[in-house]
């Protein structure tokens, strides 16, 4: 059973002005831009209290949220957005093709599959490949990475701590659950998403990233890195080799699913 309200994980600073306030069920990251906060994925509606608690305990005032950027339009990454935008006035941002998952015009939010109630919102800003959101000292650039959903976006931005700056990449979503035959047939979707995903992973793998972020903590081994941070390794999340190998693995993982399907 999916019980996101039980998924508490300690909130912590990843590096410089980048923070983790997510749960075991879904990652939520915050960037303090110096002129307000930007959230990357809001998580499940049912775990919003954990995200808010995490923000307060790190000294991040939720009322300073200006944007909520989304990796894609599934309920585990945007379930809390309707409540948060109403609470804080923050603007919601999502890939254009995921608009109807966000506003409830289609049934692709995965709410039904996860036994959740959909909390629709009309996104304030719809982004396409290459769009940028700027706030304070930070520019968030997005790259269209369709496949897991049609509007999945990977986000790139710099974070700073002391005299150092590192480029972060947040992966848009790699689950093959929405690219398998059963799902595509059930939702009358095109098989083209597989080719699009493979091409997107190739493109992503060509990008440089010092810090790899995932929208689920197991993707980028957040718990292990957190423990290393606690043990005094302040650079636990910095690994310029990790991003590209993950993107290549994600492509292979999808192709393996297709091969198994054909057996
Ligand atoms: Zn998803």
Image: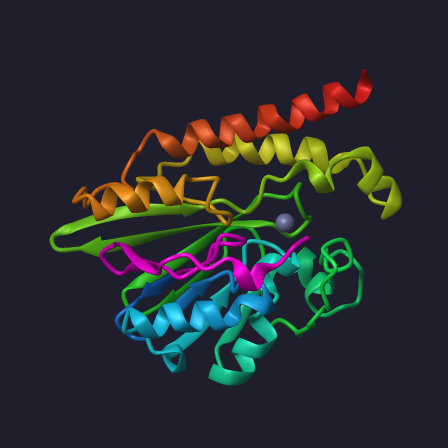
123 horizontally vs 230: left or right: right
17 horizontally vs 83: left or right: left
156 horizontally vs 235: left or right: right
Residue 117 x/y as whole percent:
73, 68
Residue shown at 41% from the left, 36% from the top: 207
Residue 46 x/y as whole percent:
59, 68
The picture quadrant where one finds residue 81 is bottom right
Whether 177 is drawn above or below 122: the answer is above
Q: Which of 92 and 18 is in front in this view?
A: 18
Residue shown at 67% from the left, 36% from the top: 176
Residue shown at 27% from the left, 74% from the top: 59
Prevailing SS of the magenta stretch? loop
Asked whether residue 22 is drawn in magenta, I would say yes
Residue 173 x/y as whole percent:
57, 44
Whether 251 is drawn above or below 117: the answer is above
The picture quadrant where one finds residue 208 is top left
Q: In which quarter of the image is the C terminus?
A: top right
Asked whether residue 71 is drawn in magenta, I would say no
Q: Give the range drawn in magenta.
A: 1-29
Whether 64 is drawn above or below 109: the answer is below
Asked whether the viewer can see residue 212, the reply is: no
Residue shown at 29% from the left, 75% from the top: 35
């Amino acid at each position: 059973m999916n019980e996101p309200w039980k998924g508490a994980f300690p909130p912590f600073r990843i590096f410089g002005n980048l923070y983790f306030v997510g749960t075991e069920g879904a990652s939520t990251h915050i960037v303090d831009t110096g002129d307000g906060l930007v959230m990357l994925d809001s998580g499940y509606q049912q775990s919003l209290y954990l995200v808010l608690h995490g923000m307060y305990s790190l000294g991040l005032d939720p009322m300073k949220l200006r944007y909520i950027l989304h990796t894609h339009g599934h309920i585990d990454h945007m379930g809390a957005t309707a409540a948060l935008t109403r609470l804080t006035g923050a603007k919601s941002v999502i890939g254009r093709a995921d608009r109807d998952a966000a506003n409830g015009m289609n049934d692709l939010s995965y709410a039904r599959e996860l036994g959740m109630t959909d909390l629709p919102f009309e996104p304030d800003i719809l982004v396409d490949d290459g769009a940028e959101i700027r706030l304070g000292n930070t520019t968030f650039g997005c790259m269209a990475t369709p496949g897991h959903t049609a509007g999945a976006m990977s986000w790139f931005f710099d974070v700073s701590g002391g005299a150092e700056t590192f480029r972060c990449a947040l992966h848009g979503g790699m689950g093959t659950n929405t690219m398998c035959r059963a799902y595509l047939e059930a939702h009358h979707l095109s098989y083209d998403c597989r080719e699009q995903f493979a091409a997107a992973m190739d493109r992503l793998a060509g990008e440089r990233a010092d810090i790899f972020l995932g929208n689920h903590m197991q993707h980028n081994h957040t718990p292990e890195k957190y423990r290393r941070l606690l043990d005094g390794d302040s650079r636990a999340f910095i690994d310029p080799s990790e991003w590209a190998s993950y993107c290549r693995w994600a492509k292979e993982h999808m192709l393996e699913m297709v091969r198994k399907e054909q057996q």
